[in-house]
Image: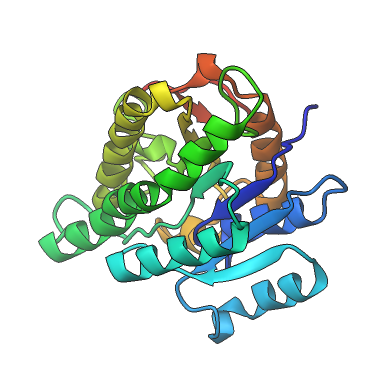
Amino acid sequence: MEMLKTQSVLVTGSNRGIGFEIVRQLAGKSNRPEWIFATCRDPVGSRAQELKNLAAKHQGVEIIPLDITDPTSIQAAAAKVTEKLQGAGLNLLINNAGIGKPSSLESETAEDMSAVYKANVIGPMMVSQAFLPLLRKASQESPQKGMSCRKAAIVNMSSEGGSITNVLGWDAGHVINYRCSKAALNMLTRCQALGFAEDEILCIALHPGWVQTDMGNALVGVQAPMAVEPSVQAILNTLGRLSEKDNGTFVNWEGAALPW
């Protein structure tokens, strides 16, 4: 299978779960990216220790502080990445960071809905806006025609739980805030695909599977069916195959199209 090949990638929410595993697998590749920007909210805290250990072993893994709900933090991270790239662009932005809170239709609160929407929709929007100049630069300076994750791309980590057609896992848990936020993230992705098409920046929403992460297990109180490692391996293979025909689509970890 065609593995992802790209010069620079930034992953939000890199200290655990899917984000950490993406960084780990990319860092271990023989043709790994020159720059892997691993961002998380608190790089000096205990929850980032595993990421710090990984960065110490692999040259090119740069840990960047980034709180996706804080515009000042986002702008500071963009400035830091711009400085590190020394005039080059950013090829791939993976908006992976997100949250969810267990809830039902009866128990959902305005506070939880607002907090989850802020992290899962507004966060990726602001992060994409901040890094857009670097993505545009990568696209403009690439000799490749068409669209690809090797050239310039935004990947928004979504969920089939936000599919209005499928509503994956409804019987296991309603998690209204999470579902609504992912449906909104899917619309954001479609808008980005339309808005950035002239820049030849590929934009997709990706469902990684129901994965055994802290959030994946906690949201509905049962263990998720899929391990993190095979999910991420398949995701990286899928990202390596994407082209302009996939722009603005909603796909799963294997690249299969999902209904909105």
- Residue 245 or residue 238, whichever sits in front: 245
Residue 18 in view here: yes
- Residue 259 or residue 44, whichever sits in front: 44
Residue at the right extreme of this rendering? 30
- Residue 66 position, x and y percent, is 44, 68
Q: Quadrant of residue 141?
A: top right
Residue 21 in view here: no
Q: Quadrant of the C terminus?
A: top left
Residue at the front extreme of this rendering? 87
Q: Is residue 236 left or right of residue 186?
A: right
Q: Residue at x 40, y 58 (%)?
A: 219
Q: Quadrant of the N terminus?
A: top right
Q: Residue at x 11, y 60 (%)?
A: 110
- Residue 148 position, x and y percent, is 60, 27
Q: Is residue 4 left or right of residue 99?
A: right
Q: Is residue 64 left or right of residue 22?
A: left
